[in-house]
Amino acid sequence: MRVLKRIPVFNFDCTYGHGVSNYTKALLKGKKTGDTHHFHLSYQDGWYDGQYGFVNDKAQARLARIRLDYMETDAICEIPNSQGTHGIFPSRHTLKDVYCNSEFATPIDNNGLTADDMDAYVALHTCIDARKMTPKWQVAVNGNLDLCATDYEGKYSMGTCYNSEKGATLPEMMGNDRDWLAVFNIAAIEKAVAAGKGFTIGTSKVPVLDGRVDGNPYVLYIPIPNNPHGVNVDPTGRYAICSGKLSPTCSVVDLQKIDAAFAGTIQPRDTVVAEPEVGLGPLHTAFDGRGNAYTSLFLDSAVVKWSIAKAVAGENPILDKLDIHYQIGHINASNSETRRADGKWLISLNKFSKDRFLSVGPMHPENEQLVDISGEKMRVAHDSAAHPEPHDAVIASPEPFKPKKRWDRADRKFDFERKLAAKHGVELETTNQVIREGNKVTVFMTSVAPNYGLNEVRVKKGDEVTIVQTNVDEVDDLSHGFCLSHYDINVGVAPFETVSVTFTADKVGVFWYYCPWFCHALHLEMRGRFIVS
Ligand code: CUK
Ligand code: CUA
Ligand code: CA
């Protein structure tokens, strides 16, 4: 439960220069806030392939990709026509797509003229190409879409809907006894898109299919009681388990029956093969690979362990309950979202700690609990305060992940800087030089503890300055960086990394630049003068 690294995604972070360097500025496009909820790893054959992680931004409808060879954000995709991008899930059979649910329906032409026509509101299920990080298609649905899951074969993606009522207020959204699970038929959607059947919305060129009409071939609506939330597919790939926030039940959907329901030979509701009462406020479900499910119970502040086979057989499936402190949201277990769930550990991500820790003011720390699930009874092994709010987590074995200890100098991340160096006929790894072209000044600079390659940079007021720093220290773990006093610039530069930052020299005087990562006994001496005349 120790924190090894916090990876900035939609926020600013000067430790790594995220939002400051040219590379990360281009990712964020000037946006300063986000709201991450769900993190998932990329797959091959139902097991982690170690390539990428994906995380959503609910606030501004974005999907970010984390490259796991360096464990940093390398792409951010803006999702068109969408608000409240909430549940996401990647393909589990291979690195192909990431499916994203919009929780907020908006008027289809969101031009301010149709705000009061609730029938004009749609929510979208968006497919993002996981390699290119661009949107491929969208399906308009009835109601809204909340959490997301995929099967293991690449046939279906799915999303829960809690607002089948199309309500705009809380009482309206609780009107129906059942909302639904929407299951998307990926082959049918891809076929229709390839045949040019979509329409487009506004200025977006992404094809949109209409999944709102009855009997459409793209979306199956399976009735689920009442305001369902989580949907999780078990490690055998057979069952999708949804929880009703306002119903004490988990609905077990048999994915082997989905094709028959699409074909109309059975009713959508016939795919629900069990609906056990598990406790109050069920939200999310994890698995141990031994046929058991672990569902978080928000209102009960508990985890319930239950047998899927017993539920399907109509027997009482409850095996154990464990109290949690307090109000658990997400839950996950080791390798639970893969074919290799190992039933060792479970994490409970709790929304409230109440009085469990020393007071730090009105906004309390939250609480995460690690639970040993290897035996018949669950046992809390550890708990610790967490930075608010510990939303969602994946527990994965370390084997698939092989992050590098230093940057590969040929990495695509340095394309911009390499081109800049080629244009000026210099090499990033050896050059310490200030090059002027009109009012554009490019500063190539290396760093080796405890010295920059340049101890002085002279420019004129109004110059557009690009600092290109390459860390060529031969020692592992030796990071430097570039912090320029009073210029709002602070970036870290990892071993063998090149980082550039562009700004206008708009203040005259002497401004010290210095190394912000403690790197040497003479770290404080690692500095130089930026002189603006
Ligand atoms: S979901 Cu995002 S608000 Cu992750 Cu249970 Cu809670
Ligand atoms: Cu280099 Cu501190
Ligand atoms: Ca509802």
Image (cartoon, helix red, strand yellow):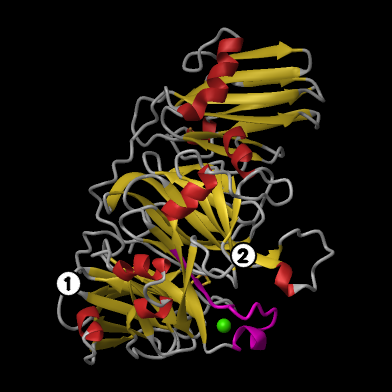
Q: Is residue 51 above or below residue 224?
A: above
Disc assigned to residue 123:
2
Residue farthest top in this picture: 425
Viewer-proximal residue among 5 and 179: 179
Ligand 3, by image quadrant, is bottom right
Please rate how many residues cluster around mark 1, counting C-alpha atoms within 10 Å: few if below 14, some from 14 to 19, many from 20. Answer: few
Per the image, label 2 sits on a secondary structure element best described as strand
Q: CA distance from mark 1 to mark 2?
A: 36 Å
The quadrant holding residue 449 is top left
Disc 1 marks which residue? 290
- Whether residue 170 is in magenta: the answer is yes
Decide which of tag 1 and tag 2 comes sooner along the chain: 2
Residue stretch in magenta: 158-175
Q: Residue at x 27, y 71 (%)?
A: 287
Residue 514: image location, x then y, percent: 58, 33
The residue under label 1 is which amino acid type? Answer: Arg
- Whether residue 463 is in magenta: the answer is no
Residue farthest left in this picture: 375
User: Which of the two marks, 1 or 2, is nearer to us in this view?
Assistant: 2
One can see residue 14 in this view: no
The quadrant holding residue 23 is top right
Residue 41: image location, x then y, percent: 37, 52
One can see residue 391 in this view: yes
Per the image, label 1 sits on a secondary structure element best described as loop
Residue 351: image location, x then y, percent: 48, 77
Q: Residue at x 64, y 58 (%)?
A: 82
The residue under label 2 is which amino acid type? Answer: Ala
